[in-house]
Amino acid sequence: MRNRPWLKWLLIGGGAVIVLAVAGPFVYFNFIQDDAPDEFSLDDVQTDATSPTTTGSSDTTAAAAEDAVDGTWTIASGSQAGYRATEVLFGQTGDAAGRTSDVTGSFDITGTTVEKGSFSVALANVSSGQSLRDSQFQGRIMDVATYPTVEFALTEPIELDTVPAPGAQITASATGDLTIKATTKSVTFDVNATRTDNGQIAVQGSIPITWDQWGIGAPSGGPAQVEDSGEIEFLLVFER
């Protein structure tokens, strides 16, 4: 039989391509790409909180703490918001998450009722730690130059069962209008809240979204595919 060295090298090359197609994404997701940050947790705020110096009896302090929640609370330092999505590359999956601390907003509370509230996330500085992904996010996907913010506003009061004591956590349901790329839809989702020992209120939650329902261009690009839904996630710290 006639020797065909080119056939041997063709088979070797084809095998190499298959190995790279399988092993490459595994290496990328497990050894090259930085891990996406963990989902937000109220424990992150509790860990950073420091107890204020107080005077007077414990009964007086406790009574003052119960009354202290009424009023307008404004987003403070330590607040963050962003997105989370799942990327698929040749069968390997990994989380992608971008975050920014450029968040503003406030809410008003009377007794155990959050009467109104809203927050806005500026998108220009959302960062995932991957420059190529961030470039796609800023341009083709979100068109940040035209639509610089994502906004949420309560449309129904939030009724709390009780005002939590400092350090305690509660869960409530929030309903409001979410606006992304000039598309506004009503959404309902759970929020977790706590009062920190230093007198702040922290609120954590995530809003599930399906990209095309909000006019968001398909995040997928090249061989990397992104699932058709993801989340807006946030950890908001409020103070008076």
Image (cartoon, rainbow, N blue to C red):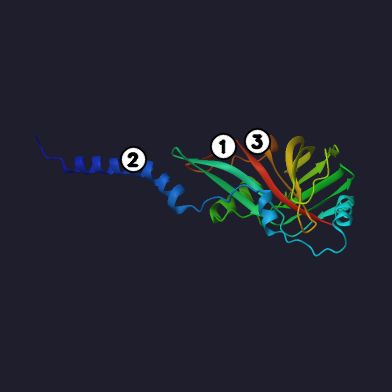
Q: Secondary structure at mark 2?
A: helix
Disc number placed over residue 17 in the picture, else none: none
Task: Give the mark nearer the N terminus: 2 vs 3.
Answer: 2
Q: Which residue is mark 3?
A: 212
- Residue at the image point whose x is 77% and y is 46% from the top: 151
Task: Label 1: state its secondary structure.
Answer: loop
Residue type at tag 1: Glu
Q: Marks 3/1: CA distance? A: 11 Å
Which residue does the numbered mark 1 point to in the structure image? 227
Q: CA distance from mark 2 to mark 3?
A: 33 Å
Query: Which residue is tagged 2?
Result: 18
- Residue at 76% from the left image edge and 54% from the top image edge: 196
Q: Nearer the viewer, residue 197 or 58?
A: 58
Query: Where residue 33 sits in the image (x, y, percent)?
Result: 48, 52
Which numbered disc, 3 or 1, marks the residue closer to the eye? Answer: 1
Residue 26 appears in the picture as rendered? yes
Q: Are marks 3 and 1 in contact (CB under 8 Å)?
A: no
Q: Earlier in the sequence, mark 2 or mark 1?
A: 2
- Is 93 left or right of 112, judged from the image as shown? left
What's the residue type where badge 3 is placed? Asp
Label 2 CA crowd tier, 10 Å (few <14, some 14–19, many 20+):
few
Foreground residue, 194 or 182?
Answer: 194
The answer to whether mark 2 and mark 1 are in CB contact below 8 A is no
- What is the crowding at mark 1: few (fewer than 14 residues within 10 Å), some, or many (at least 20)? some
Which corner quadrant holds the N terminus? Answer: top left
